[in-house]
Amino acid sequence: MAVRVQEADFDIGRELADLTAGNHAIGGLGVFVGLVRDIAGGEAVSAMSLEHYPSMTERQLAEIEAEALARWPLEASLIIHRVGDLMPGDNIVLVACASAHRQAALDATAFLIDWLKTKAPFWKREETPEGARWVDARESDDAAAARWSK
Amino acid sequence: MAVRVQEADFDIGRELADLTAGNHAIGGLGVFVGLVRDIAGGEAVSAMSLEHYPSMTERQLAEIEAEALARWPLEASLIIHRVGDLMPGDNIVLVACASAHRQAALDATAFLIDWLKTKAPFWKREETPEGARWVDARESDDAAAARWSK
Amino acid sequence: MKLMYFAWVRQRIGTASETVDAPAEAATVEDLVAWLKTRGPGYAEAFRDTRAIRFAVNQEYVEPTHPVAAGDEIAFFPPVTGG
Amino acid sequence: MKLMYFAWVRQRIGTASETVDAPAEAATVEDLVAWLKTRGPGYAEAFRDTRAIRFAVNQEYVEPTHPVAAGDEIAFFPPVTGG
């Protein structure tokens, strides 16, 4: 179980191999990778920068991961979130959950990314032809996260 | 959009990199990897072999993929399924769907693996201390696939 | 018609595929199964409980009442367990 | 107490963090905001619509009515947009 925030890119194949290595109880691995798009809200995006609140990020991500572990029988999980300057096509975030069963792996992955989108203190700023702008939070993200509250 | 059935292992990092390379409209990538467990139904599994019906596999996987493309706005998708002799910890299947939006990527990935489990003509045989046995189909897989019929 | 058998259906019958000239009465998948069961103990054992078997004609899933014809590729197998 | 500002809140105020001695009346997050708004036009602009702002005390999300005390780390930021 690990949470990392870093400026450097991550090697998806290496991270997933490390996550599952040697654990033959794993039957399914769910993964989500978020990438920088070159268009958002109808406008071209030439670059993105990601700011965060380090001490709170660590705490929130650890809480979110603990919640996932309490809900699903996970063998392993990983969250990596990048900060700093990114370009279209760059990786932003990696979420991975491994379990004996595929449904747990897939559901926990969806849960982690939904909560990360609404709770983890990261802020995106996009460079567009109109200038730089802070990305607005989306109501659809709140709705997605609310699915898991019951 | 690609479907492959092969004996050889696949390099997850390489496959995902190839899938998203150069397409900056992709904002989210959903992935599922199925692996061979060393225990099933309470019994130790020392090896697995996977048999399939090649001409029907190809047709079923292509139909399933076309259905996913009709339901979600995908930028790219990939299914790789291994056949032949496998050991615990080995990769069995890779499903990946890329979209502008994460929900489409995650839902399409779950859809593909659910349908693959119930429609694609593969059969698993496990080696256990009690001898070899064909894996029984699980009702939970039918239930999972039925979620998508509406 | 070409018949194909997979997994334990193949093992019980003892062959992976064969080309047969089925009698004219074998007009549907279930008729064909009834005829196959008369061909030997392996067939009888394989088709003992047809609820445990799935059928495909020309690579598409079909019901037992589906018609079959010369030239068809007809497959018999247990519920799939891939993924 | 230590105050931290992020994203456009930070930009409007013009600083990322500061340590302040708030008056005794600033007993809750919303009281603290009211006092901060008096400190200059950047603060007034940043806190013009507090519905657009989220609050954390000691790294946990809180409501505007949450108490604050000397020694707390209090953060002000727009709704998060990571992932």
Image (spheres, coloured by chain):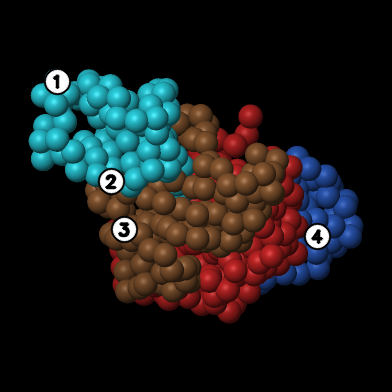
Chain colours: A red, B brown, C cyan, D blue
Residue C50 vertical placement versus A62 (above, below): above
Neighbour tally class for label 1: few under 14, some 14-19, many 20 plus, Cα within 10 Å: few
The residue sitting at 64% across, 69% down in the picture is A18
The residue identified by callout 2 is C17
Q: Three-letter amino acid code at disc 3?
A: Val
The residue sitting at 38% across, 38% down in the picture is C13
> Measured from the top left, where is residue B19 in percent x and y?
36, 67
Q: Earlier in the sequence, mark 1 or mark 2?
A: 2
User: Does the CB distance between marks 3 and 1 fall below 8 Å?
Assistant: no
> Measured from the top left, where is residue A75 in percent x and y?
69, 53
Q: Are marks 1 and 4 on the same chain?
A: no
Q: Quadrant of the N terminus of chain D?
A: bottom right
Measured in 3D between alpha carbons, the distance from the residue under mark 3 to the one under mark 2, in whole angstroms, is: 25 Å
Where residue C25 is drawn, which disc sits there?
Answer: 1
Measured in 3D between alpha carbons, the distance from the residue under mark 1 to the one under mark 2, in whole angstroms, is: 21 Å
The residue identified by callout 3 is B3
User: Does the CB distance between marks 3 and 4 fall below 8 Å?
Assistant: no
The residue identified by callout 4 is D73
The residue sitting at 74% across, 49% down in the picture is A66
Q: Three-letter amino acid code at disc 2?
A: Ser
